[in-house]
Structures are given as structure tokens and as C-alpha cells.
Image: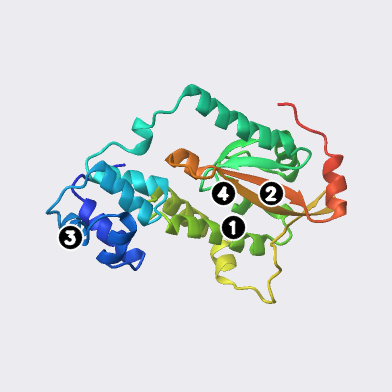
Amino acid sequence: MNRPQGAFGSLLRSWRNRKRLSQLDLALDAGLSQRHISFLETGRSHPSRYAVRQICDALQMPAAEHDVMLVSAGFAPQAADANWSADVRAAVEASVDHVLAGHDPFPAVAIDRIWTLQKANKSAQAFFARAGGTGQPNLLLDLMSPGPLRDTITNWAVVTRALFRLVDLEVARRPHDADGRRLLDQLKSLPGVADAIADGPRAHPAPVVTVEFLIDGAALRLFSLIATIGMSMDAKLDDLRIETLLPADEKTRRWFEGLPQRTS
């Protein structure tokens, strides 16, 4: 949110070019005149808050980038003036808890866009402790750093390549995501990561990438489902992801059904 005021025109032009839209195309999608779009880009006109919203919606910008545009035009970000009641916030929090708890006995976590852990159900806590997780907040750094957790993943290079691509695509959606770019640089600096992401698949890829663990002699195979909060206009909620890990075979299912749950 440190984008200087007055930068709206150049940001608008950059996003329009990024989406490969002409000024007329954007004007039609945003319900504004082409002349107004032109004046906004050159700085001859100052946008209203309504115009900023229309343009951001037309450009399908993530909520955080919408906030950047608002600040560059001299307005407060959406989160600063969102008229949310305590009941709504409590309902969102309770819903996330409900999904996580309901996924037991299989692991489920709530993470942000760059995989910083927000919450974990009991199965996730028990599983990652058993697999050698260090407990550091960012799950990708924990998984890709040399150590016990990385050593338990028998297809680590394949998983690393797939996960890095997911984060790379997420960061590409947000040109001003300094935290995301910093994480990508951190990940690439870890031993073996750059080689893994540069090495393409050697055979026809499977329809779903499974994470294959070897823990105490048990070969476990998991795949994931990732859910987001729909139609969110709040940057923090737009960042939230719920990842649920599911058994890819019956042997893995039985292993998790017998996994003792942590209570702390």
C-alpha cells in the first residue's frame, strides 16, 4: 500500500495492456467513455471511487490490486472502509473452522496465497509432526528446505515443480506482490529447487499430481483440493485458501484412519 498517489494513470495503462484491451474495449466493459479512459491514463482527469471500481471489475483484478489502484488514486483501500459487522467476520471464521474440523481424519490447512499457515486441523498437526515438519509458518519453505519432511517425500522433485508453478501463477496475477516475489526467490535459492523446477516431466504427466510420502515404512499417496472464498472483495479473504489432503488409495486411507490425533 505504499504506491504513491498520482500513479493511477500509469497503473491503469499497464493493466489495460496486460489484458490486451484497447481503450475502447475497456470503456465498454467498464461502462465509461473512451474519452474518460484516455484522460485518466494521461492524468488529465482524476478518477472517482466509482470509476476505479468499474475499471478494476472490468479488468478482473484481484482484491489486493484493486486496493493498490484505490490508493494510487488517493482513496483508502477497500478493507479500510468495509462496513463489515462482527457477526459476518465471526461467521467466516466459524465456517473455516467447520471445514477444517469436518475433514478429519485427513489433513486440512488454511493458508494464504503464498502458503503461510493460518490454521490446521488435528490430523494435519499430527501428520506433519510425524513426517518431520519443523513448524515454520510457511509450508512451502518447510517442504522444500533440506530436512526430515523433505526426505519423506519420495517424488519431491515432481511435487516441488508443481507447487512452485502454482505460486508463480499466483504471483503473476498481482504485479505488486512483493511478498510473493520474495518467497519465489527464497524457494529458488534452496538446494535442489532450481534444478527441480527447470527439469520438465520425463513422461506423460498424470492427470493429478500426488504427494508420495514414506513414513515409518508406510508408502502414502495424497492429492489435494484447494478452496477459496467466492466473490470476496476483501484482500485478506481473497488471499485465503483451504487445502484439504485426500488419500489417493485405500492403503493411505486406512493409515490416516489409524493416526492418533494431537490435542495441542
Q: Mark 2 near mark 4, Cβ–Cβ under 8 Å?
A: no
Q: Secondary structure at mark 2?
A: helix
* Element under disc 3: helix
Q: Residue 141, which numbered label? A: 4
The Cα–Cα distance between marks 3 and 4, rounded to whole angstroms, is: 48 Å
* Residue receiving disc 3: 35
Residue 159: x %, y % from top left: 65, 60
Q: Earlier in the sequence, mark 3 or mark 1?
A: 3
Q: Of the residues tagged 3 and 4, which is closer to the observer?
A: 3
The mark nearer the N terminus, 1 or 4, is 4
Mark 4: give few (<14), some (14-19) or many (20+) Cα within 10 Å. some
Which residue shows up at 59% across the image and 58% down it? 163
Q: CA distance from mark 1 to mark 2?
A: 15 Å
Foreground mark, 2 or 3, reads 3
Residue that extends furthest to the top in the rendered view of this protein? 86
Q: Which image quarter holds the C terminus?
A: top right
The residue lying toward the viewer, choosing from 219 and 59, is 59
User: Circle 1 is placed at which residue position?
Assistant: 163
The answer to whether the residues at label 3 and label 4 have Cβ atoms under 8 Å apart is: no
* Front-most of residues 216 and 119: 119
